[in-house]
Image (cartoon, helix red, strand yellow):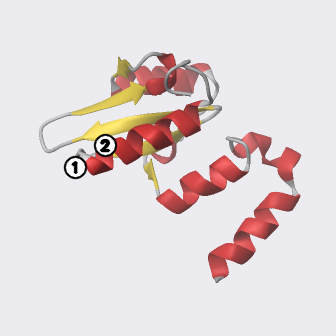
């Protein structure tokens, strides 16, 4: 995945987030509709990293433009960090966004059982 530049956005971000955690960098996962990116947020600045597209740096405004172009309005929900549990759930769903969950109807019930344990 790393050497051949292949994989899906969420798995590449997971590797990126694990490395960032090891380096003590404030990187979190951001679940966009149909895409997954990382966010670096410090006391002084915030920027987003599209690791799937060669680490392209994005501003919050770039992300809002993407959300508007895809017909989404609730920007704060999409630009909020996802917990590790939600990232794993999204990975289990094959990176599905909210509108794609109907394709994976058996997985959410299984995931919900594990969340209660």
Q: Are marks 2 and 1 in contact (CB under 8 Å)?
A: no
Q: Position of residue 82 (x, y in %)?
A: 48, 52
Q: In the image, what residue occupies the spot 72% across and 66% down?
A: 111
Q: Is residue 28 visible?
A: no
**Nearer to the camera, 28 or 32:** 28
**Nearer to the camera, 80 or 75:** 80
> In the image, 115: left or right of 74?
right
Q: Which mark is residue 20?
A: 2
Q: Is residue 115 visible?
A: yes
Q: In the image, what residue occupies the spot 37% across and 23% down?
A: 61
Q: Which mark is residue 110?
A: none
Q: Position of residue 27 (x, y in %)?
A: 32, 43
**Nearer to the camera, 62 or 105:** 105
Quadrant assignment for the C terminus: bottom right
Using a 10 Å C-alpha cutoff, classify the residue at mark 1 as few (fewer than 14 neighbours), some (14 to 19) or many (20 or more): few
Q: Residue furthest left?
A: 44
The kind of secondary structure element at disc 1 is loop
Residue 116: quarter of image = bottom right
The kind of secondary structure element at disc 2 is helix
Q: Position of residue 17 (x, y in %)?
A: 39, 44
Quadrant assignment for the N terminus: top right
Task: Tell me the CA gap for discs 2 and 1.
Answer: 6 Å
**Nearer to the camera, 25 or 33:** 25
Q: In the image, what residue occupies the spot 47% across and 58% down?
A: 83
Q: In the image, what residue occupies the spot 64% across and 27% down?
A: 71
Q: Residue furthest bottom?
A: 117
Using a 10 Å C-alpha cutoff, classify the residue at mark 2 as few (fewer than 14 neighbours), some (14 to 19) or many (20 or more): some
- Mark 1, residue position: 24
């Amino acid at each position: 995945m790393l050497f051949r530049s292949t994989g899906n956005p969420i798995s590449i971000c997971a590797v990126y987030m694990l490395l960032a955690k090891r380096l003590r960098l404030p990187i979190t996962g951001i679940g966009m509709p149909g895409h997954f990116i990382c966010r670096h947020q410090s006391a002084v600045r915030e920027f987003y990293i599209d690791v799937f597209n060669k680490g392209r740096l994005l501003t919050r405004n770039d992300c809002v433009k993407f959300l508007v172009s895809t017909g989404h309005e609730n920007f704060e929900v999409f630009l909020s960090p996802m917990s590790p549990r939600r990232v794993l759930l999204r990975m289990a769903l094959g990176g599905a966004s909210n509108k794609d969950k109907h394709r994976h109807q058996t997985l959410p019930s299984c995931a919900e059982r594990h969340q209660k344990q």
